[in-house]
Image: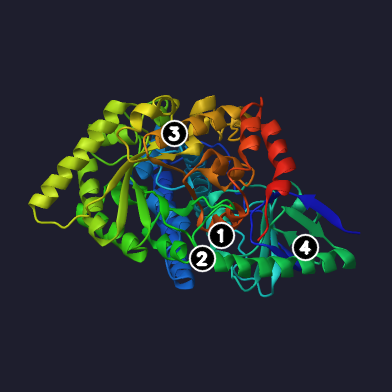
């Protein structure tokens, strides 16, 4: 008899294959005092070195496989190369007289408490866990389970899977991935984008029921796993898989067309990137530009910011890869959880996400901001570049930042550099203050980009990584919808355009509402671009107006979601 489990769809379509259960990979160490501090300190140092060698080797293998570096591996190497993190670990060991193993456990716990908003990668929590497991593997002399040696095509089932395990999978043999834990996180977006295989996460108990002698159906579209399916279920899902493949072929045709709603409104669907090497994937994805180019990768080794020339070469690489599309580059969004050395900033802030980060840090340390602006301005001669400042809360700070841009333009022209004539300068709207002052800010900014992830957190005063309050993280709540609608209207009043670059832009239940509000650009993960363009082409912004106004009048996110799911089928016009 078949057994069905529901989880979170991680994309990639539908597959049917035998099951391969990967062993548990959660290594733990007991709380224990050190007998010999010097010996434990050396063991800790060695675990850093050995883990780094592992990561470099994995990075080389992955780059050979994919043709470019993968952000997950790059992030791990960046973390382990951070001299501040290594020193923190050594200090924790000496001060508390801990063993190396227990120090690693506590280091992971400490790093996960840092604000995830300003670190240099969207893979932070997964990367920190992965790093800890690899260090413990060396210290405890226990291997990490690995499906890299799989010798037949199979559905890989595990309690959890780390980012570096995922990127080592053989794309020809791993038919799908299913886990007990996890969410629709960044490394699973990587999985569907790079490996193009189905994934279902957060099933909670798939490892309880799955065995190696089983067959499984993995529906990465609807988040469903069927163990030991019946012949009828196999037949039904084989037809669904074929239909999905045909649909992907049809979506490919959209790459050569502009995105327009059913009533003719022009909408731009762009992609988010964190590393210059991702640009090749985006260029092939059907994206109509880069709506968010994160630049925290420039703070890499030894907590030093890359030189102006190195930054220029990275930005030039991106704009020349998509010379006819707008590349929106966000200036450094770093805080005291990922600082550049030698900055005089209080490292004991209790709430780093509310402290010196983003535009605040840039204005306080122009020696960081000005070289980045010069590099971006120089790159503008090779394509379409827009500059975007993060974490803006007041008109005064944005005007000051814009003045610095103008100063650097004048300086570069005096030095004989060729620059574009129409470099747009915009800002992130991710604080309630920016929402409230949108009418004033729109007089100075060329465009707005709504950072929905931060805006939801600050609007509801909730940390989505905090289990006690994450239920308040509600992007579909009418308070959030009203805030976005207000920002769009104020920007349009001043003739400015608005993008949205957070996870909300990739929520199918939110996208019709954003279209109805008049959002000019969606900026989403590359693997979501074509499906969103297809959805927009079948919706009329005018016909969605009654639905929007109804949603704005509701009291909670659940009511909004139910409204969209009920009304959308009748409004969608399949082409």
Residue under label 1:
530
Q: Position of residue 446 (x, y in %)?
A: 33, 41
Q: Is residue 143 visible?
A: no
Residue under label 4:
217
Disc 4 versus disc 1: nearer the observer: 1
Disc 3 versus disc 2: nearer the observer: 2
Disc on the earlier residue, 4 or 1: 4
464 up-or-down from 372: above or below? above
- What is the distance, in whole Å, between disc 3 and disc 2 at their CAs? 31 Å
Q: Position of residue 104 (x, y in %)?
A: 48, 43
Disc on the earlier residue, 1 or 2: 2
For the image, the number of numbered tags is 4
54 up-or-down from 563: above or below? below
Q: Is residue 321 visible?
A: yes
Viewer-proximal residue, 90 or 232? Answer: 232
Viewer-proximal residue, 462 or 156? Answer: 462
Callout 3: SS: loop
- What is the distance, in whole Å, between disc 2 and disc 4 at their CAs? 31 Å
Disc on the earlier residue, 3 or 1: 3
- Relative to 208, is 312 on the left or the right? left
Q: Are marks 1 and 2 in contact (CB under 8 Å)?
A: yes
Q: Quadrant of the C terminus?
A: bottom right
Callout 1: SS: helix
């Amino acid at each position: 008899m078949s057994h069905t489990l529901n989880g979170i769809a991680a994309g990639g379509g539908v597959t049917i294959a035998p099951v391969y259960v990967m062993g548990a990979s959660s290594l733990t160490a007991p709380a224990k005092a050190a007998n010999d501090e010097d010996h434990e300190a050396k063991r800790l140092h060695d675990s850093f070195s050995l883990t780094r060698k592992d990561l470099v080797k994995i990075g080389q293998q992955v780059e050979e496989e994919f043709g470019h570096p993968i952000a997950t591996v790059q992030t791990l190497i960046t973390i382990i190369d951070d001299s501040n993190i290594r020193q923190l670990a050594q200090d924790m060991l000496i001060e508390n007289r801990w063993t190396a193993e227990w120090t690693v456990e506590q280091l992971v716990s400490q790093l996960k408490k840092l604000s995830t908003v300003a670190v240099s990668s969207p893979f932070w929590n997964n990367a920190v866990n992965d790093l800890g497991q690899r260090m413990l593997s060396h210290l405890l002399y226990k291997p990490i389970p690995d499906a890299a040696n799989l010798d037949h095509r199979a559905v890989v089932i595990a309690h959890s899977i780390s980012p570096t395990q995922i990127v080592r999978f053989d794309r020809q043999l791993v038919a799908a991935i299913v886990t007990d834990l996890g969410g629709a996180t960044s490394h699973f977006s990587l999985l569907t984008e790079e490996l193009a295989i189905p994934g279902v996460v957060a099933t909670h108990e798939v490892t309880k029921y799955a065995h190696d002698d089983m067959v499984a159906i993995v529906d990465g579209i609807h988040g469903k796993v069927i163990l030991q399916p019946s012949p009828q279920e196999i037949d039904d899902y084989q037809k669904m898989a074929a239909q999905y493949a045909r649909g992907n072929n049809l979506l490919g045709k959209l790459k050569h067309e502009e995105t327009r709603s059913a009533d003719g409104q022009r909408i731009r669907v762009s992609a988010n990137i964190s590393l210059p090497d991702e640009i090749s994937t985006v260029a092939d994805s059907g994206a109509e530009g880069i709506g968010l180019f994160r630049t925290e990768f420039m703070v890499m080794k030894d907590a030093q910011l890359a030189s102006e020339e190195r930054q220029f070469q990275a930005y030039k690489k991106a704009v020349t890869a998509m010379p006819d599309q707008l590349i929106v580059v966000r200036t450094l969004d770093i805080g005291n959880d990922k600082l550049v050395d030698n900055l005089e900033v209080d490292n004991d802030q209790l709430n780093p996400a509310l402290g010196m980060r983003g535009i605040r840090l840039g204005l306080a340390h122009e020696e960081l901001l000005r070289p980045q602006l010069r590099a971006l301005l120089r790159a503008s001669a090779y394509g379409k570049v827009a500059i975007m400042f993060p974490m803006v809360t007041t008109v005064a700070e944005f005007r000051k930042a814009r003045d610095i841009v103008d100063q650097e333009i004048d300086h570069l022209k005096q030095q004989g550099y060729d620059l574009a004539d129409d470099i747009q300068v915009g800002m992130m709207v991710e604080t309630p203050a920016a929402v409230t002052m949108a009418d004033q800010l729109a007089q100075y900014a060329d465009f707005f980009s709504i950072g929905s992830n931060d805006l939801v957190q600050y609007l509801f005063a909730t940390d989505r990584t905090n289990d006690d309050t994450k239920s308040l993280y509600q992007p579909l709540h009418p308070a959030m919808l009203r805030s976005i609608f207000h920002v769009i209207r104020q920007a349009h009043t001043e003739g400015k355009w608005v993008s949205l670059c957070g996870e909300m832009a990739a929520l199918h239940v939110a996208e019709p509402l954003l279209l109805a509000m008049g959002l000019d650009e969606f900026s989403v993960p590359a693997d979501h671009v074509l499906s969103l363009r297809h959805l927009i082409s079948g919706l009329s912004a005018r016909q969605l107006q009654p639905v929007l106004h109804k949603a704005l009048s509701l009291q909670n996110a659940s009511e909004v979601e139910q409204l969209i799911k009920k009304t959308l089928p009748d409004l969608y016009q399949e082409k």
